[in-house]
Amino acid sequence: MIHNLSEIITNFLVSKKVKNENESEIYIYGYETFFSGVIDLIITLILGILFRRLITAIVFFVMFVSVRMYTGGYHADSYLKCKMIFIGIIISVLGVTYIKFPLYIVFLIIALFLITVYRLCPIENPNKPLSKQQKRKYRKISLLYSIIWSIAAIITYFNTTHISMTIVSSEFIISLLMFVGIVRKEGKGNEKECDS
């Protein structure tokens, strides 16, 4: 559905000579990414309202998207799987915001997250390879954002715990997605070796 809508918009713009036909695939991908992001935001807002945690849901969305954009990690192989996993992640994170972890657990998760980001990122998507320059840039940005969000988690722990728990649980999930991305990438590499 998203792909078809993106194709319709791109074909319309190409027919009106607003966009270059040679770059159609780029525009289609761009529109798919845009629409997918809008759907993710709408899902986040709806679940935030249902959980009575709208501000928390918005914090989650901004944190998750800003960091994950540069760290990479597991990506589902279809939009439906992607949305189902995303919904599961949001429900998990919003559910955890009703719990207050002890401070040492918060520090432990933050340490795990920062080490994971430092050691693994960026994790390339096979469909979107990165140049060495892009890898360096993504690594720096992901480390910077990760440190900023980690500091925010510690500061908010003492006065708005639900925000801190949102950030910390999001960091934990991003770490997991990075590990799964690495495992799947290595598994696919081993499958290719076995086939040859």
Image (tube, grey):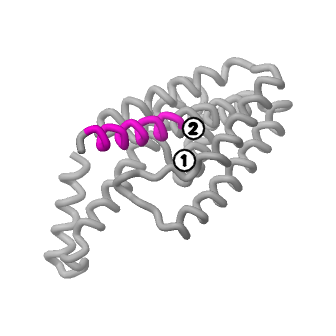
Between discs 1 and 2, the one toward the N terminus? 1
Does the magenta run of residues contain 182? Answer: yes
Quadrant including the C terminus: top left
Q: Residue at x 83, y 39 (%)?
A: 155
Residue 9 sits in quarter:
bottom left
**Residue nearer the viewer, 196 or 99:** 196
| Residue 68, placed above or below residue 8 | above
Residue 46 lies, in percent from the top left, at 46, 33
* Magenta stretch in the rendered image: 179-194
Amino acid under label 2?
Answer: Ile
**Residue nearer the viewer, 106 or 84:** 106
Circles 1 and 2, Cβ within 8 Å, touching? The answer is: yes
Q: Which residue is mark 2?
A: 174
Amino acid under label 1?
Answer: Arg
Residue 171 sits in quarter:
top right
Residue 179 lies, in percent from the top left, at 53, 36
| Residue 28, placed above or below residue 119 | below
Q: Residue at x 59, y 39 (%)?
A: 60
Q: Which residue is mark 1?
A: 68
Label the magenta part by its dominant secondary structure: helix
Residue 135 sits in quarter:
bottom right
Disc 2 crowd, CA 10 A, few/some/many (<14, 14-19, 20+):
many
Residue 58 lies, in percent from the top left, at 58, 41
Q: Identify the secondary structure beneath mark 1.
A: helix
Residue 86 lies, in percent from the top left, at 44, 34
Q: Identify the secondary structure beneath mark 2.
A: helix
Q: Is residue 102 left or right of residue 127?
A: right
**Residue nearer the viewer, 37 or 123:** 123
Q: Residue at x 48, y 67 (%)?
A: 131
